[in-house]
Image (cartoon, rainbow, N blue to C red):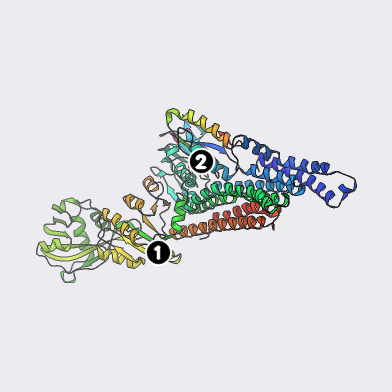
Amino acid sequence: MKKKFACEVDCANCAAKLEDAIKKVEGVQDATVNFLTQKLTLVAEESEFDAVLEKVVKEAKRIEPDTVITI
Amino acid sequence: MNKKMKKTRNRIIVTLIIFFAVFVLDKVGILNNIGISEPVRLVLYVIPYLIIGYDVLKKAFTHIIRGQAFDESFLMAVATIAAFAIGEFPEATAVMLFYQIGELFQSYAVGKSRASITEMMSIAPEYANLEKDGTIEEVDPEDVEIDDVIVIRAGEKVPLDGVVTEGESFLNTAALTGENVPRRVTVGDEVISGCVNDKGTLKVRVTKGYEDSTVAKILELVENAATRKAKVEKFITRFARWYTPVVTIGAALLAIIPPIILGGGFASWIHRACIFLIVSCPCALVISVPLGFFGGIGAASKMGVLVKGGNFLEAIAETTTIVFDKTGTLTKGEFKVTKILPDNEKGLSEGDILEIAAIGESMSDHPIAQSIREAYGKTIDSNRVKDAKEEAGHGLSAVVDGKQIFLGNRALLAARGIGAPEHSENGTIVYVAADGLYVGAIVISDIIKDGASEAIKKMKSVGIRKTVMLTGDRRETAQNVAREIGIDDVHAELLPADKVSEVEKLLETKEKYEKLAFVGDGINDAPVLMRSDVGIAMGSLGSDAAIEAADIVLMDDDIRKIASVVKIGRKTMRIVKENITFALAVKFAVIILGALGLANMWEAVFGDVGVTVIAILNSMRALRVKD
C-alpha cells in the first residue's frame, strides 16, 4: 500500500537524510521525502501499515526533531 | 510568510538592533571608557546571540544526544562557541545572525518557487457540484462516485472525467495542453477534468473516480517526478554525504595538529577551523539541483508537456537522435482519397471510377474501403453489387451492375491477365479493372500532420543531428513522406517487432553519452517507447496507455513541442551545472583561504548561506519558458 502524508522538513539536506533513515525502518518497502512538495510517500504492506507508520514517525523525530508528519 | 518565518523575522530584527548597539558602543570605545570588564562585554554579546541562536543550540544539543553529529545546527553551534572561546565575540554573534537571515531567506525563496509551481499546476479542482434528488451540493471531488451527476457552471473547472448528459459548451484545455483552444462539447461527448467550462452549464455523468481521473493522474505524475532522480542529483546526494564529515574532520585536525607541530597559540588555528565548519554545510548543493529540475519540469508542463522525472529531462538534453513512428505521429493516421487517375483510352471520368470502386467495396470494412466510400459520399444501393470476394492482402473481386470488376494491387490484376501501367504516386494505389480491362486507379494516402516539417526543422536547429522514421508502409510511400517532411533516414516495410530491433541497432551505433528518443502515438509501440532512452508519446488528452508507457507525454500531440522540451532540458542542465560549479568553487576557495589564514568568518558565512541563496535564485530561472 502506498500513502502520502504532509511532512514539514526544514532543509533539503535534512529531507535527504530523513528519506535515507526512513527507508531503513523495518517494514518500509519504499519511501520518499519530497522537500519541494513537503510530502512523505510511504510504501508498506497493508496489514502492518499503521505499525510501520508509527515506527517511521518515531524515527523521523529522532533524526530531525523539527519534522512534523501529519497523519 | 508563514508563522514560523514571521517569528524568525522578528527575532532577527530584535537581534540586529541589540547587536548593532553593542557593536557600535564596543568599537568606538565607550564600553571600555565606562569601565566594563571583559566578562560583562562577553555577556553583552551573548544576549543577542542567545536570542537569535537558542533554537539552533537546542537542536544541536538534541542531535548530539541522539548521536547525529554532522548536522548543520551542530556545526554552527560548535563554530560560534569556539569563536567566543577565542575572544571573537562580535564574529560569533554575527555568524549566528547571518546564518539565521540566510535560512529565513532560503525558506522564503523555496516557498516562493514552490508556490509558483503549484500555481502552474493549479488544475486541481477544489470542489464538485453534486446533483442529488434535484438539489445541488458542493462536495469534495474525492467524494463523488462513478455514475453520479455533477453540474459544471460557466467559469468552473471540470472536476472529474465524465460524459455530458445535458447542455453544451466550449471547454478550455489551456491548463492541460498549454494552448488556448476551446473545444466544443455537447450531449454524449467526453469531458476531461482540468479543463475549464467557458460558456454554458453542463450536466456530466461521472465515469471515473477522482483518483483515476486525468487531473489526479497528471498531478501525481508531476509530484512523483522528483523521485526519479537524475544522475547529477544522485551524485550530489552522495557527495554531500562525504563532504560534511570530511570537512569537519579537517577542521578538527586543523585546530589541533598545526599548533602542536608549529607551536604558537591555538586561537588562530581554532579560528581557521571555525571557517571550515561554517562552509561544511552542503545545503546549497543539495537544494539547488532538485529545485532546478522541478523548475524545468514545471516549465514543460506549462507548455502541455509532461516530463516524468529529472532523469528524463537530463536524457532529452543529451539526445542527438530522434526516431519517429510514421502513422499517427508524423501523419494523421487517417486515410483519404488524394488522387484519381482514369486511364485516358477507356474514357471513364474520375467520378465513374470512384463510383465503381465505392460500390465494389461497399461490403468491406477495410480502412481503404471506408476511405473510398467516404470520398464517394453518396448512399450506395447494395443491390448493384454481387459476389464480392476479398483476396486478403491483394484486394477484392465483385460484380457491379453486371460487370466483373477487380479492385486491388497490380498483382491482383496481373493474376487475371490484366495489364496496368505502374504508378508511383505517394500512398496506397488501388487499381481498378472492369470487364477484363484496366480503367484507372485511385490513390489513397495518409495525410501529413500540420507542422510536421516545421517540427523537424526546429529539432535540427536545437542540435538534433539525426532523424529516423520507422514504418510498416511501402518503401516508396515512406520515402516520399520522409522527403516531404525532411527526415534523414527511413526504415520501411517493418513488422511491429522489427521496430524494436531497428531501435536497438540505432542504440548500438551511437556514442555512449548521446541519447536516443523515440516518438510514437503510444498505442501499439509501448515496447519501443520503453527500449529507447527517452520515450515520447502523444497524450491525446486522457489516453492512459500513452501516459503510462512514455517518459515524456505531449498532451496535445503537437510534435513541434519536442524541440522546446530539448531546449528546456538543456537550460535546466546548464543551470544545475552552474550551481554545482559555483557552490563548490566558492566553498573550496573559502576552505583554502581559511586554512592559509586569509579568510575570515564573514567570508565563510557567505560561502554557506550566500551561496545557497544565489543557487536558489539561479534555479528559479528554470521555471521561465521562452519559446
Tell me the subunit letter for badge 2.
A
Tell me where the magenta segment starts and ends, as one range.
Answer: B143-149
In the image, residue A62 lies at what x, y percent? Answer: 57, 34
User: Which residue position holds label 2?
Assistant: A20
Q: Secondary structure at mark 1?
A: helix
Q: Position of residue B255 (x, y in %)?
A: 67, 49
Q: Position of residue A13 (x, y in %)?
A: 57, 45
Residue B116 visible in the picture: no
B608 horizontally vs B483: left or right: right
Front position in the image: B257 or B511? B257
Looking at the image, which residue sits at the far right?
B34
Q: Which mark is residue A17?
A: none
Is the magenta region chiefly helix, strand or loop? loop
Q: As shown in the figure, which amino acid type bears the numbered disc 2?
A: Asp
Q: Is residue B167 magenta?
A: no
For the N terminus of chain B, which image quadrant?
top right
At mark 2, the secondary structure is helix
Q: Residue at x 53, y 57 (%)?
A: B577
Q: CA distance from mark 2 to mark 1?
A: 44 Å
* Position of B133 relative to B55 (above/below): above
> Residue B586: image x %, image y %?
62, 57
Q: Which residue is mark 1?
A: B456
